[in-house]
Amino acid sequence: MRLFTYSIITFIIISALSCSKGELPEEHFFGKVDVTLANLPNTPDVDLYFDGKKINSIEPSNTSVSVVLPAGRSGKLAFYKASTDSLIADSMITVLPNAAIALKLAYSEAIGLKGFVTSTPVSPDSLAMQIFETLSDTYFPYEKLDLHIIYVNNETGNLDETGFVLKGLTKGTLYPQTIVLPLNDASGMPITYGGRFVNSETGAPVTQPDGVTDIFALPVDPGKFYLLNIHDDPSGSFYPEVINL
């Protein structure tokens, strides 16, 4: 009996030493999620859930809220209007040990916008924007649109493609890709940028109510990241508008 007891004690000691020499089990590590809610017009407070469990509430501001979660775990991070079951956006994430995930949510009922902001550092000689459209159903009753970013070639005067095509834009949803463009061409001349919508289903150009105009100029705000809302005025003319965060 005494020999059996000593054997158990020896096993416990060996196990403890093995753990101290090796790495801790993954559940002993933690990661961090930094969440920011952009302060836009009529942005409500938001409740944050991870795999169906409420973990925090967020107010609109430019200050991030940090949430610590067990590392090695994948799950759904969901944002709801505070004290409601109204889902704004969600994202699958995997929490890594001793690492941070940064997410910034933009939501405004006044603007008609929701989605994750993918801001990036911007040099003074560049433009960086994330685009969404809120065109009226009266003139533009499309489920999805493709947006071609074009520019005026300073050498030829032609309208050329930049290579950026935002496929499947849906009304009020931020396109996930940040568009970064140079402010000037190789000779140092400023570049004029524009946009052209195409029907995602048919590939046909999308025009203003005049049936002719299908291009519009993009506003330039160099050296910083901004959102660009492409909507229309009461006559149905394209109207791109910069939203600074």
Image (cartoon, grey):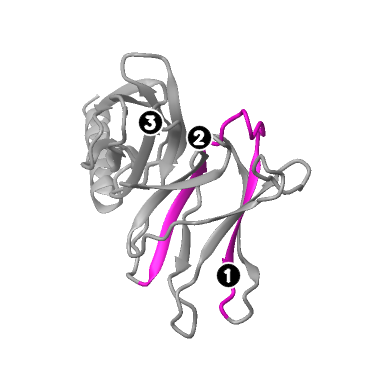
Q: Is residue 148 magenta?
A: yes
Q: Position of residue 184 (x, y in %)?
A: 45, 75
Distance CA(mark 2)–CA(mark 3): 9 Å
Q: Is disc 3 surrounded by few (<14), some (14 to 19) or many (20+) residues within 10 Å?
A: some
Q: Residues within 10 Å of mark 1 (few under 14, many from 20)?
A: some
Above-or-below relation of 25 to 186: above
x 69%, y 45%: residue: 206
Disc tally is 3
Q: Residue at x 48, y 41 (%)?
A: 174
Quadrant assignment, res 35: top left
Give the residue number, with chain letter if any, for mark 1. 152
Q: Which mark is residue 172?
A: 2
Q: CA distance from mark 3 to mark 1?
A: 33 Å
Packing grade of label 2 (10 A; few <14, some 14-19, many >=20) is: many
Seen from the viewer's position, the closer of residues 104 and 42 is 42
Q: For the residues carrying marks 3 and 1, which lies nearer the camera in this image? A: 1
Q: Which residue is mark 3?
A: 108
Which span is picked out in magenta?
A: 125-154
